[in-house]
Image: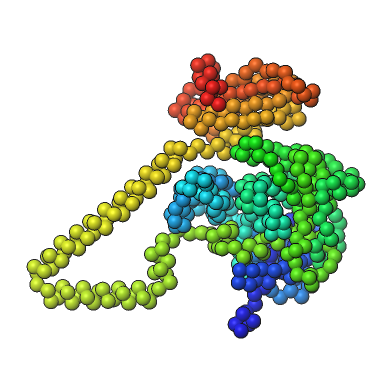
Amino acid sequence: MLDRLVDRTALSIDWDPASLRVVQVRLGRGSASVVRALTAPMPADLAPMNDADGLGRFLRRVLDQEGIRVRRVMVDVARHQTILNSLALPDAPPYELINMVRFQAAKDLPFAQDEAVLDFVKSGLRPDGKTVDVLVAAIREDVLAFQRRVCATAGLRLTRVGLRPYATSIGVMRADPGAAGGRTLVVDVGPRMTEIDLIRDGHLVFSRSAAVTFEAAPTEGIVPVSPPGTEETADEAASAAPTPTVRSPVGHLEVEITRSFEAYRATDPGCQLDRIIVAGATGAETEIAAAISQRLRAPATMFNPAGLLERRVTAGGELCGFAAAIGLALSHTLEESAYFDFLHPKKATSPEARRLKRLPLAAASAALSVAAVAVGYWQWVSPKYQTMGNLKQQIKEYEANRGRIEELAKRVREVEEWKAQEVVWLDDLYLLTEAFPDNKENYLLKLTMDNRRGRMVLQLASKQNNGANELANSLCQLKDERGRVVYQAEPLKSTHAQQQEFPYLGEVHATRVKVNERAGVAKEPSRRGAGRSANGA
């Protein structure tokens, strides 16, 4: 009876420089269903990524024109506004894991920690049963303030601020349950920024944004939308006539998608894509699906959430661009610890503190009872009994402290053992993408990493005989933020390959320069050290 009196509807809103997307969702206990979806083109005189007040007034006008009276709203933060990182941490209770995440994530922030809003989700337990993968995201306070300002201007009550790539992955997996198995590449095409995400075994493990400009198809007025009639495969997309105005951006985006997948493959050697799903509303999605399907040799389909919508959703338009908005709405069905919410980030609260917060009256009563007993005891018991009681209390405190100290020492040993064994190559992969030559002249065949010795062996195919030399020189010139050399790299002699387009095979051995050696840059790596690099890899 009470549920009928409570408004259980909410809005999920997503926007880009070209259009505004609104999804109305009905929320239940552990369930959510989309009841309405509409899109509206942005006014020509509005800069929605910078003008919070103008965007809020436009959003209010759209909702009023459609007769939408819902006040609760969810929004998301785009990938290019987010610092996203993956961590491998010891499995621990939630309040301890939060402290470890904040300590580790603070090292990678490009801005002060007090200016950041940080949240995370667990991606799953590793096979050893002791280490958990954690996806950490951080945004600036001013990004969150922008979202608050938009909703306040529109007269809406902001209830959650999610992460757009994560919401997109949820929408894709709900629309196509098969996407949760194996490796799925998701390309969400926007008019200015495209998000490239990779889902592995039901978890988002990689995300990157690429700045490629597309001209959105012109529309006028608010367009109610519904699911496309059928999914469009890459073969059907290839037979469609491409639009000449988007041919150049499609080629540019194809290169960015290939680079992103190769960057991910460095952390997952030998992986193969099981499927590609393309979302977006620029009009170039079918051509993009055909191009990357051929390039990456995996079947590609368009995002189609037909099974997620109620039958009475108004017909017309396309839902291919609603992956993030629908995923954000459907994430309501997950536990709070399983989705991002920068408005209410996870905080370290011990079980004792949570129980005290839930039972303030009982805690106060217990404290008064203890105080009353203590007053009576010290007033009526003789001094000898008081002394004996003090000694017993001291013994109890010493025993309790000893147990906590032993538990803390055990936790410290576990963390130290984990840190001694863990080697994070994320910074090296980022530097490698900067140093790698043009992929039209070279491409990486194999990347081998030696955690114990801090070495990388890169095998590449090149059109020219000097491809390995160029890569080795670029690696040797890389410096860290203090101007210290990062690698000592040495190319091996190139050999001929069987293929005509890239006839030369090269190999480069790159060894990390230890921090205490970077003050004086070694002029040339010793032959003995180079031999260990080749054999160790």
Q: For residue 50, what is the image quadrant?
A: bottom right
Asked if one can make out residue 2 in the rendered structure from this viewpoint, the answer is yes
Is 381 displayed left or right of 129 in the figure? left
Residue at left 57%, top 28%? 456
Residue 40 image point, x, y percent = 79, 63
Residue 88 image point, x, y percent = 51, 45
Vertical relation: 50 (above or below) 496 = below
Residue at left 82%, top 70%? 314
Which image quarter holds the N terminus? bottom right
Q: How many marks?
A: 0
Model colouring: rainbow
Residue furthest right in the image: 241
Residue furthest bottom in the image: 1
Vertical relation: 295 (above or below) 232 = above
Residue 13 image point, x, y percent = 70, 63
The answer to which of 411 and 515 lies nearer the viewer is 411
Vertical relation: 455 (above or below) 152 = above
Is 276 displayed left or right of 216 in the figure? left
Is 239 displayed left or right of 470 in the figure? right
Q: For residue 176, what is the image quadrant?
A: bottom right
Residue at left 63%, top 52%? 202
Which image quarter holds the C terminus? top right
Is 179 displayed left or right of 522 in the figure? right
Asked if one can make out residue 103 in the rendered structure from this viewpoint, the answer is no
Residue at left 73%, top 41%? 257
Vertical relation: 322 (above or below) 8 = above
Q: For residue 220, what is the image quadrant?
A: bottom right
The answer to which of 145 and 224 lies nearer the viewer is 224
